[in-house]
Amino acid sequence: MSQYVVSGRFQSRDGFSEFNTVVDAPNEDVARERVYANIGSQHGLKRTQIEIDGVAEEATA
């Protein structure tokens, strides 16, 4: 599995909060889905309240 860096923002009480997170996933679509699930469950948000700006594969050393 590859690691993907996912960045974006989500709605909070004070407007929008930005995030950058690294997830293990077989491809970009699964990485995007895992971020929706993780951030949604942690902050009690729906998918429409989360905006993903970019998904990039993390370079391996």
Image: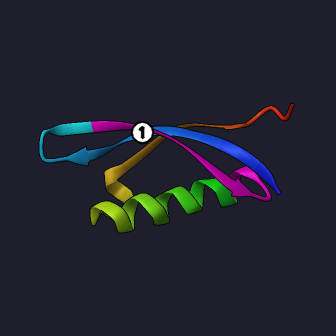
Residue at left offset 35%, top offset 63%:
42
- Judge whether 7 appears above or below 32 on screen: above
Dominant SS of magenta comes to: strand
Residue at left offset 42%, top offset 39%:
19
Q: Quadrant of the C terminus?
A: top right
- Please name whichever residue, 61 or 4, is drawn nearer the observer in this view of the structure: 61
Residue at left offset 74%, top offset 36%:
58
- Judge whether 51 appears above or below 56 on screen: below
Residue 8, by quadrant, is top left
- Judge whether 9 appears above or below 41 on screen: above
Q: Quadrant of the N terminus?
A: bottom right
Badge 1 density bin: few <14, some 14–19, many ≥20, Cα 10 Å: some
The x, y position of residue 23, in whole percent, is: 63, 52
Q: Which range of residues does the magenta coloring cover?
A: 17-29
The x, y position of residue 51, in whole percent, is: 41, 44
Label 1 belongs to which residue? 19
The x, y position of residue 29, in whole percent, is: 68, 56
> Label 1's element?
strand
Q: Indicate the amino acid at tag 1.
A: Phe
Tell me: 30 left or right of 35: right
Tell me: 36 left or right of 46: right
